[in-house]
Amino acid sequence: MENKGLTVSNKTNPNSLGGAIAEIIKCERKTEIRVIGAGALNQAIKGVIVARGFVASLGINLVCIPAFMNTSVEDDIRTGIKLIIREEK
């Protein structure tokens, strides 16, 4: 099954997101998080911090690379942010 990344909103629970990120990282070594808006970005960053704590005991250090993206929302093109999360090599 291909990992297409995670979409985060301002209502996303950071602990649940962190657990999801950690599980994907353990299996696939990388994922992406997509957000639109400051509240969603805040929850996403907290989720990455939680995930980092979960995988640290396995000797995995996470790297987070931010990038802009364009996406369609209700027939309108919006600019969002994607966070590329991967294991540090």
Image (spheres, rainbow, N blue to C red):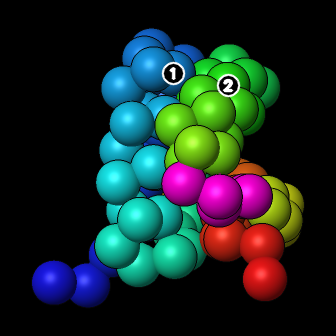
Q: Amino acid at mark 2?
A: Lys
Rounded to the nearest angstrom, the CA distance separating label 1 from label 2 is 6 Å
Q: Which residue is mark 1?
A: 14
Residue drawn at (64%, 45%), measured in percent from left and top?
A: 56
Compare residues 86 and 35 and report the one nearer the observer.
86
**Residue 70 marker:** none
Residue drawn at (63%, 33%), measured in percent from left and top?
A: 53
Q: Secondary structure at mark 2?
A: helix
Quarter of the image where one finds residue 61: bottom right
Magenta-span inclusion, residue 59: yes
Residue drawn at (41%, 65%), measured in percent from left and top?
A: 26
Q: Which residue is mark 2?
A: 46
Q: Is residue 17 left or right of residue 67?
A: left
Residue drawn at (56%, 65%), measured in percent from left and top?
A: 32
Magenta-span inclusion, residue 61: yes
Quarter of the image where one finds residue 86: bottom right
The magenta segment: 58-62
Q: Earlier in the sequence, mark 1 or mark 2?
A: 1
- How far across and how far down the image is residue 39, in percent? 68, 19
Q: Is residue 27 above or below residue 55?
A: below
Q: Amino acid at mark 1?
A: Pro
